[in-house]
Image (cartoon, rainbow, N blue to C red):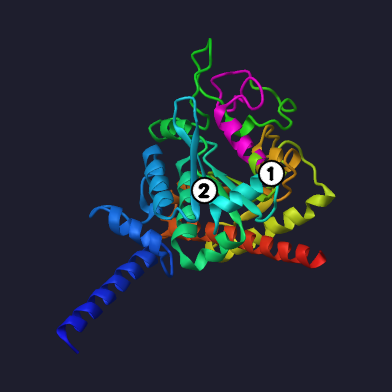
């Protein structure tokens, strides 16, 4: 073999090794060319290739989304026109095989591609925002997940309360509201998890503007709430499922949040919830059991103005769930008695993503059965 050929082989081998190293590090078996090109051209010497290993702030969200939508623009479209009270961008990420064509058809009422809608960060947590970015990374970077964006249009709102999240990162108090100034008061913030237009007036009204549970002057009063509901309305004709990621828990929760009832037509939703929990427990249930139950049962009281109830009742999305991830409180308690296993957060993240993939598989099977009936 000539020296030139040997050199060429070495280059190819090194390229494959680099690709495999990054792929394995970020959980992919094989990396998409567009994602690898992004890493090769943008990644600094001391920077981490995997979004799950980076501190999650507003700038991280912007840099990651701008980069990935630029390099993988054939199947990722980024919307950045909505903003918060403080002017931070509320991003909408669309992912599908032919994303521009499919968005147009779904929003025009042509159900060519079913929609999976995810949002994160309503309660000002960074953990859920990081997980939403991780999902985007896995769908965009990993070739083995190509069927997930081939068969569905994914709409992901990765950071729905960036003002609250930024304040929460530097605050010693547990903050779960947005960061809008309340006129005529020295108080700040509305709990957007209670600001949706569903059973808004049915719960005990919190009048204390300083309370972390202050639900706002009226439903849909906040920019963040309007943003989420507008996205729901935009894709209403195609939405097959909606999941809202919330922090500090380890559970998949189905409606309702506002009342302790169980409807006959909710059995299929509950069965999906049970299957998702089973899959997560196979991957991440060693120390803590991933629970499947209603939002009301988890909270032990009514939580009115909830986005999951809004999606179920107003948008007719029966496969609507709240997913609690990364149990902060439990970790604090457990760490006083024993050390958590090394890589426990990685196991949790992998387990949660396997739950999302399981939901996708259930929806694929359901769509297949619907087509057979036709």
Q: Return the residue at label 2.
A: 327
> Which quadrant of the structure image shows residue 282?
bottom right
- Residue depicted at 81% across the width and 64% down the height: 374
Q: Is residue 361 left or right of residue 326?
A: right
Give 250 or 139, whichever is nearer the viewer: 139
Residue 313 visible from this viewpoint:
yes
> Which quadrant of the structure image shows residue 228?
top right
> Where is residue 347 shown, x and y percent of the image?
47, 60
Dot placed on the residue nearer the N-terminal end, 1 or 2:
1
- Residue depicted at 82% across the width and 47% down the height: 263
> Where is residue 177 shown, x and y percent of the image?
53, 29
- As for residue 144 lying within the magenta part, the answer is no
Q: Is residue 43 above or below residue 217?
A: below
Give 199 or 3, whichever is nearer the viewer: 3
> Where is residue 170 shown, x and y percent of the image?
38, 32
Q: Residues within 10 Å of mark 1 (few under 14, many from 20)?
A: some
Give 153 or 136, whichever is nearer the viewer: 153
**SS for callout 1:** loop
Give 25 or 234, whichever is nearer the viewer: 234
- Label placed on residue 236: 1
The Cα atoms of the two marked residues, 1 and 2, are separated by: 32 Å
Q: Which residues are magenta?
A: 207-233
- Label placed on residue 252: none
- Residue depicted at 72% across the width and 32% down the height: 198
Q: Is residue 165 above or below residue 107?
A: above
**SS for callout 2:** loop
> Where is residue 241 shown, x and y percent of the image?
67, 51
Considering every residue shown, the one lying at the far top of the view is 184
Q: How many marks?
A: 2
- As for residue 224 lying within the magenta part, the answer is yes
Considering every residue shown, the one lying at the far bottom of the view is 1
């Amino acid at each position: 073999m000539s020296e030139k050929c040997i050199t060429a082989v070495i280059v190819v081998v090194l390229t494959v090794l680099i690709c495999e190293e990054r792929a394995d590090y970020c959980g992919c078996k094989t990396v998409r060319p567009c994602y690898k090109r992004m890493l090769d051209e943008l990644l600094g010497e001391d920077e981490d290739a995997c979004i799950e290993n980076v501190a999650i702030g507003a700038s991280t969200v912007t840099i990651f989304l701008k980069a990935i939508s630029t390099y993988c623009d054939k199947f990722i479209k980024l919307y950045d026109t909505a903003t918060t009270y403080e002017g931070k961008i509320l991003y909408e990420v669309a992912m599908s095989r032919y994303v521009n064509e499919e968005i147009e058809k779904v929003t025009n009422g042509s159900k060519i591609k079913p929609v999976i809608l995810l949002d994160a960060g309503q309660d000002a947590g960074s953990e859920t925002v990081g997980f939403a970015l991780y999902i985007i990374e896995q769908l965009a970077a990993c070739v083995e997940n190509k069927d997930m964006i081939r068969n569905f249009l994914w709409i992901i709102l990765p950071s729905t309360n960036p003002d609250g999240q930024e304040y929460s990162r530097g605050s010693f108090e547990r903050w779960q509201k947005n960061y809008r100034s309340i006129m005529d008061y020295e108080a700040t913030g509305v709990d957007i998890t209670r600001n949706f237009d569903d059973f808004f007036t049915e719960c005990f009204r919190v009048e204390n503007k300083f309370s972390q549970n202050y639900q706002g002057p009226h439903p849909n009063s906040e920019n963040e709430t309007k943003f989420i509901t507008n996205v729901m309305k935009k894709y209403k004709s195609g939405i097959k499922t909606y999941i809202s990621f919330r922090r500090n828990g380890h559970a998949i929760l189905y409606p309702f949040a506002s009342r302790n009832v169980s409807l006959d037509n909710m059995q299929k939703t509950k069965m999906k919830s049970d299957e998702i929990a089973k899959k997560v427990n196979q991957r991440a249930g060693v120390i803590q059991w991933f629970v499947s139950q209603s939002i009301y049962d988890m909270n032990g009281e009514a939580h009115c103005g909830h986005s999951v109830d809004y999606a179920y009742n107003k948008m007719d999305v029966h496969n609507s769930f709240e997913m609690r991830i990364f149990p902060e409180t439990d970790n604090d308690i457990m760490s006083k008695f024993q050390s958590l296993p090394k890589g426990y957060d990685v196991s949790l993240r992998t387990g949660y993503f396997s739950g999302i993939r399981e939901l996708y598989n259930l929806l694929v099977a359901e769509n297949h059965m619907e087509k057979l009936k036709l």
